Amino acid sequence: MDIEEAKKELQRILTEKRYNHSLGTMKMAKELAKVYGEDEEKAAFAGLIHDIAKEMPQDKIMEYVKLHNIKMDKIEEKQLGLMHAKLGASIAKEKYNCDEEIQKAILYHTTGNKKMDRFAKIIYLADKTEENRTYEEVEKLRKMAKEDLNGALLFTLDFTIQKSIRNKRLIHPDTIDLRNYLLS
Ligand SMILES: [Fe+2]
Ligand SMILES: [Fe+2]
């Protein structure tokens, strides 16, 4: 878990925009970890590398999936981009020797999952509220994330589900499960 080494690697493989998003997520993850008493250095690292597999070309994704025997569900088969979460978690383990808490946070950062712990929620929200994000509700969500983690999570889920509906995109059942779980 060498943060400088990871930065160099990310700078090499990601576009400038995504690299900056990764740095922003690192910063926000650290801030939120401080608020909630989680390990700040671990949160920073997880935030930094959460999108490490995001720009992997399709053939490389398939190669990696086969090589590491990673399972794909029906939604992932149709929206291959979702796989960057599973691949990112795997790379975190294989390449950076990250512990399970970090692996799970990366695994759940795209669809969400009702098994998310507080650390995973922090990474999920850091990704959505980092300083380069500019959507309309982001200021409100930034404030909320520091005051009410579950409330902010629910707000984000509603927002992303509505966006998926508008864009006629598939909604992963894990996202719905998490929302139902938070509401009940
Ligand atoms: Fe992502
Ligand atoms: Fe991201």
Image (cartoon, helix red, strand yellow):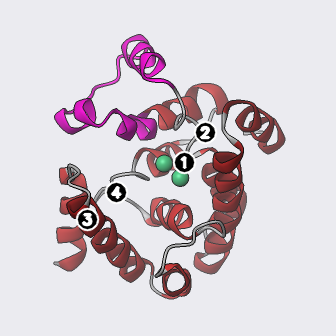
Tell me which label, 3 or 1, sits earlier in the chain: 1
- Residue at (26, 57) in percent of width and height: 167
User: Marks 3 and 2: which is nearer the front?
Assistant: 3
Q: Look at the numbered discs 1 and 2 and tell me whether their residues touch, using CB distance below 8 Å.
A: yes
Q: Are marks 3 and 2 in contact (CB under 8 Å)?
A: no
User: What crowding class fits label 1: few (fewer than 14 Cα within 10 Å), some (14-19), or many (20 or more)?
Assistant: many
Q: Cβ of disc 4 within 8 Å of ligand 1?
A: no
Quadrant housing residue 156: bottom left
Contact between labelled residues 4 and 1, with CB atoms less than 8 Å apart: no
Residue 160 included in the magenta stretch of the image: no
Q: What range is drawn magenta here?
A: 57-86
Q: Residue furthest front?
A: 167
Q: What amino acid is labelled 3 in the image?
A: Ile
How far apart marks 4 and 2 lie (CA) works out to 20 Å
- Counting residues from the start of the chain, the first of labels 4 and 2 encountered is 2
In this view, the mark in front (1 or 4): 4
Between the C-alphas of marks 3 and 2, the distance is 30 Å
Mark number displayed over residue 102: 1
Q: Report the residue marked by disc 3.
A: 161
Cα distance in 3D space between marks 3 and 1:
25 Å
Q: Earlier in the sequence, mark 3 or mark 2?
A: 2
Q: Which mark is residue 112?
A: 4
Counting other residues with Cα less than 10 Å from the Cα at mark 4, is it few (<14), some (14-19), or many (20 or more)? many
Question: Disc 2, ligand 1: is the CB inside 8 Å?
Answer: no
Location of residue 150 by image quarter: bottom left
Classify 34 as above or below 41. Answer: below
Q: Which mark is residue 98?
A: 2
